[in-house]
Image (cartoon, helix red, strand yellow):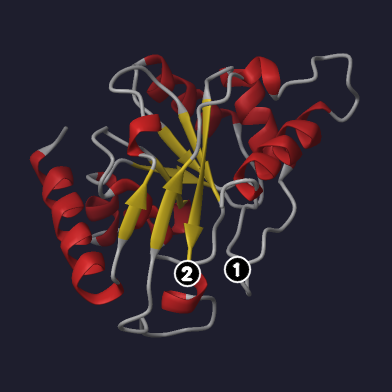
Amino acid sequence: MKLFYRFAQTSSFLYFRLFHRFEVHGLCNIPSEGSFILASNHSSYFDPPALGCKLPRNLHYFARDSLFFWPLGVLIHNLNSIPVNRSQLDFRTLKRVLKVLASGDPLLVFPEGTRSVNGQLGSGKKGIGLLLAKSQATVIPARVIGGHRVLGKGMLLPRMGRKLIIKYGNPIPMSDLDPGKSDPERYETISSRVLSAISSIR
């Protein structure tokens, strides 16, 4: 784990703890080694750092490809960000993701693809189902609670004092999520099942 990444983790945790009464539950479900895909709901720009700040792993993230310009590009590159075209999951991105997982590192994905306006779960994206099917990695569902109240869509500044909670669920093998190649809606089914697992976290 890079020193800068570790510094960012610690700084994020201290901020969330001091200003948002931050709580983290279920860290025992995070394996100490080996790759996995962390799949979470998405309602705030704070979701990635909140999900990763107490994780004792070198977590990788997706970031919009248009953000990779100097100096912001250097910053997010050092935070393990992977450039992605939001309109589609291209072959180059998929190849890079599979390389990250093959190296034994975890990856964070948001099956909804974009932030929820009201904190409610939306529908899953086909591209995430494709990624999961190709990787065949274990999925760990996670839920961010309160993110839309802290820094939701349309908010310019975070609301201090609003509580933020992260909950990690039990690992799910891909065999429990993937209906197989015979399913004509295979990728949609995978995304839907992942969202159901996220929804079951209370």
Residue at the spot 60% in from the left edge and 68% down from the top edge: 119
**Callout 2: SS:** loop
Q: Amino acid at mark 1?
A: Gly
Marks 2 and 1, how far apart in space?
A: 8 Å
Quarter of the rendering containing residue 88:
top right
| Position of residue 115 measured from the top left corner of the image (x, y, whole percent) | 58, 64
Q: Amino acid at mark 2?
A: Gly
**Label 2: few (<14), some or many (≥20) within 10 Å?**
some
From what the image shows, is residue 11 above or below residue 19?
A: above
From what the image shows, is residue 27 above or below residue 42?
A: above
In the rendered image, the quadrant that contains the N terminus is: top left
| Position of residue 68 measured from the top left corner of the image (x, y, whole percent) | 36, 54
Residue 50 — which label? none
| Position of residue 70 measured from the top left corner of the image (x, y, whole percent) | 25, 59
**Label 1: few (<14), some or many (≥20) within 10 Å?**
some
Residue situated in front as seen by the camera: 24 or 1:
24
The earlier-in-sequence mark between 2 and 1 is 1
Residue situated in front as seen by the camera: 200 or 93:
200
Residue at the spot 64% in from the left edge and 46% down from the top edge: 200
- Residue extending furthest toward the front: 202
Q: Given contact means CB atoms under 8 Å apart, are the residues at marks 2 and 1 in contact?
A: yes
User: Is residue 103 left or right of 116 when viewed as pictured?
Assistant: left
User: Is residue 54 left or right of 182 when viewed as pictured?
Assistant: left
The residue identified by callout 2 is 146
**Callout 1: SS:** loop
| Position of residue 100 measured from the top left corner of the image (x, y, whole percent) | 39, 24
Residue at the spot 38% in from the left edge and 66% down from the top edge: 164
Residue 119 — which label? 1
